[in-house]
Amino acid sequence: MKGFLLSLQSEFYKSRKTLGFWGAILLPTLIMFSMSVGFYFNAHKLVNHTPEMLWGQFAGIPLAIMGSLLLPMYIIFVAYSVNVIEHKSDTWKTLFTLPIPKWSIYTAKYLFAVILILITLTLFFVLTIAFGTLLGNIQPKLKFGGFHIETHLFQVYAKLFFASQGIIALQFLMSLLWKDFLKPMGIGFVGTIAGVILTGPARWEYAYLFPYAQPLLSVMGVGNKKIRPTETPVFFTNEVLISMAIAVVIFITGYFILQRRSIK
Amino acid sequence: MVIKTENLNFYFGNQPVIKSLALQVPEGSIFGFLGPNGAGKTTTIKLLLNLLKLQEGSISIFGRELLGNRLEILRQIGSLIEQPAIYTHLTGRENLINRARLLEVPVNRADDMLKLVGLNDAGLKKAGNYSLGMKQRLGIGLALLANPKLLILDEPTNGLDPNGIIEVRELLIKLAKEEGKTVFVSSHMLAEVERMATHVGIINGGELVFQGSIQDLESISQPMVQVETDNTADAANYLKRNGYEIGHVTHSFITLPFTSKDDTATINAALHNNGHRVYSIGKVQKDLEQLFLNITQKSST
């Protein structure tokens, strides 16, 4: 356990100067800031919105962008960035000659990628509430004050986080095994596009089995129904359960592959 | 024995890379692991560190089997494999601090190591901007961080300038002599190994062709006298008539076994007095290629 905590601490120490780490903070901050600027200057068009509609729109746009494209792409990037540190510096061999169990090093790295995604989604949630409240105060025409979205939105983001576990596990394993960025990136990109098609235009009823479709399905459902961040979602839907099951299986498989693998 | 391998075999696919290797590295020795590029030195080191999975044979370190005692053994080893593995986006000092935390060593050891390997002034510079020599020094600093009992260093003087090579050599000798550490150091340069090692293992084509103390090696790796003259054939004949054993004659050089400094002076005077023009004369070490030839000749007789 100590080795695991030391490894996790080391992941933070190594990553704190990389874009992979700062991306987790910058991505939600930039998106939510530009969204707020847009709402501020278009306030006159939104004066007739009820507080619930206003929050629905303000929280729904980033959720739709994240669910469909941005979150899968960001996961591809994060999964690669935590592994590329070792690929680029050729440090796998030093990591595995440390007197620390292999499972600790592997689990800490995996968990670090998960934590980065968690930070991003938490910041999206927090900044949606913070910027919405701020907008309501500095632009009183926007009636943000009359509705409380916190509980619903928290659950929507929590669901999105759990539905992302399948992609995280897949992308992490590919980035761990392949030094070449193009392979996990290419597969991830094709997977993401296929995910959008399967849930949207194709309306495939078993799309929930496909990891890259799961985040989008978790926030929108089949056929890209209108996103409803103002309503409490049904939490343990098929895509969430399958995503978590895929993550568990791939995480364990990844460990056995690493255990049997020689470090070149 | 600190390191002992028995019947160690390793294959890449069907190709044998290490063949029946039986290393014996005594405690407190500087063991020079000598061999040309591609002989299997790095593969052996990776097997000793359990980076490559053991296929056949056994490895015991500190008297314990590597399989089954991996973590306890690694705790007492500092290593540097191939080119140093350094996080290029961190500074030299941060690289050391990161490793110190992982090894649960006081963080101020990082500064001690920077001083020890002569990187005190470059500690706050990004390691990506280091020269190869500086990276190598940092790699050695990282290997020494936890004050290990056994150091396994793969070509540690690679990329170092002559001063750096001398410093590393002196540091390793000091660590073995004063602190009783065992140093296992690979190299493809015979002269380098001869200058610091107390014990030598020579590997070629995956096979250990020689293993013993440096004195044993010296008896095989006899130094030679190389003479540059105007007419090497005549000069060689003249020396032969006078009872000298001639090693090897080329268009420009005659090579014969070195016996003593005085003898070299006598050869020079004799050639000179006999009308031969001697352009240069001096003691030279055999290169690895000749050494292998000697060893294989010796083992076949």
Image (cartoon, coloured by chain):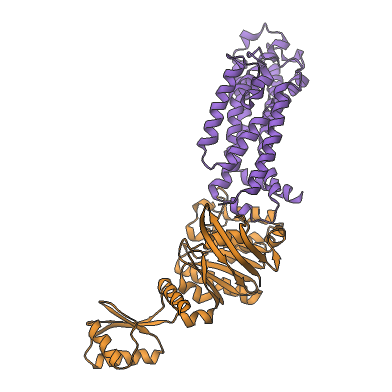
| Quarter occupied by the C terminus of chain B | bottom left
Q: Residue at x 63, y 43 (%)?
A: A16
Palette colour of chain B: orange
Q: Is residue B120 visible?
A: no
Q: Quadrant of residue A158?
A: top right
Q: Residue at x 65, y 41 (%)?
A: A254
Residue B30 percent coordinates (x, y): 58, 73
Q: Nearer the viewer, residue B203 or A198?
A: B203
Q: Residue at x 57, y 62 (%)?
A: B140
Palette colour of chain A: purple
Q: Is residue B89 visible?
A: yes
Residue lying at the far front of the rendered structure = B301
In the depicted structure, whether residue B172 falls above or below residue A109? below
| Quarter occupied by the N terminus of chain B | bottom right
Residue A115 percent coordinates (x, y): 69, 36
Residue lying at the far top of the rendered structure = A48
Residue A114 percent coordinates (x, y): 68, 36
In the depicted structure, whether residue A59 falls above or below residue A22? above
Is A25 placed left or right of B118 in the picture?
Answer: right
Q: Nearer the viewer, residue A188 or B206?
A: B206
Is B224 placed left or right of A154 in the picture?
Answer: left
Q: Nearer the viewer, residue B93 or A159?
A: A159
Q: Quadrant of residue A94?
A: bottom right
In the depicted structure, whether residue A112 falls above or below residue B37? above
Residue A25 percent coordinates (x, y): 64, 33
